[in-house]
Amino acid sequence: MIYQVEYAGHTVRYALRWMDTRLYFGRYMRQAPGENWDVRASDDWLDYIRPMLPENAAPDAVEFRSLIGLTCHPLLRWDCCLFHAAAFLWQGRAWLVTGPSGVGKTTQFRNWQRLFPGEVQMICGDIPVLEGRDDGSVWVHPSPWNGKEHMGDRSLSAPLGGIVRLEQKDENVTYPLPVCDAIPVLFRQFMVRPENEKDILALSRLVEQILQYAPVWFFENRGDDASTALLRETLKGGRHDTL
């Protein structure tokens, strides 16, 4: 049976191997007409993904995880791609906090909610969609991959405000990244393995558009209240210094 999901207004169709996989997509996924599909997880791809998950992971959980990278290939046709970050809405813009799992992306969001109530809403807690538009803007959209906390709102989309590369350290320091340093940061966080020249060119075009549209910061942080206050000031376009 064929199912489909809309990302940034574009439809991707899936040929699922296990029916229960659709449950992980929740309300994002619905049955599709016809038999044509864009994405199907091969045996080789499932074997590649399986060691990244717990040994007792169910086959449908493995398939759901495997579909992240595979979904990126049709999305690149529309200058979109999945990006590893927590994406939240603040002052009409989407802000991305990215970095390896466990560095405190969710902690920063929860601190912000507590310290500045009502200011922020989570768009997607783990892997949002980035979309490059013809007018030069970059937009951020939700996806079904919203993290183990299932934080996100599929009704929220917004233009990109900026990207923060997070790292745990013993002090709180934030500074803007020059383009030469921001480029590898962005490429590493996209959830795709380009398969051909067309994919590489599409991804490069999206990275270039992001760098022209929004700032990128590096943020060393302790995960405390002071770090979140500094993050908020940084995103205002204010100081880049040490607390």
Image (cartoon, rainbow, N blue to C red):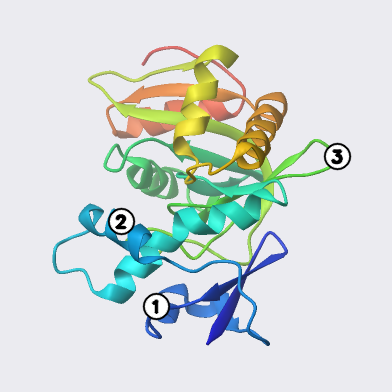
Q: Are marks 3 and 1 in contact (CB under 8 Å)?
A: no
Name the residue beneath numbered marker 2: 49
Name the residue beneath numbered marker 1: 21
Callout 3, which amino acid? Answer: Asp
Question: Relative to the observer, which residue lies in front, 148 or 187?
Answer: 187
Which SS class for mark 1? helix
> Image quadrant of residue 228?
top left
Which SS class for mark 2? helix
Sequence-earlier tag: 2 or 3: 2
Q: Where does residue 90 sit, x and y in percent of width and height?
A: 60, 45
Label 3 crowd (10 A; few <14 / some 14-19 / many >=20): few
Compared to residue 20, the image places residue 213 above or below, namely above
Callout 1, which amino acid? Answer: Thr
Question: Relative to the observer, which residue lies in front, 186 or 111?
Answer: 186
Sequence-earlier tag: 3 or 1: 1
Name the residue beneath numbered marker 3: 135
Compared to residue 170, the image places residue 33 above or below, namely below
Q: Which one is in front in this view, the residue at disc 2 or the one at disc 3?
A: 2
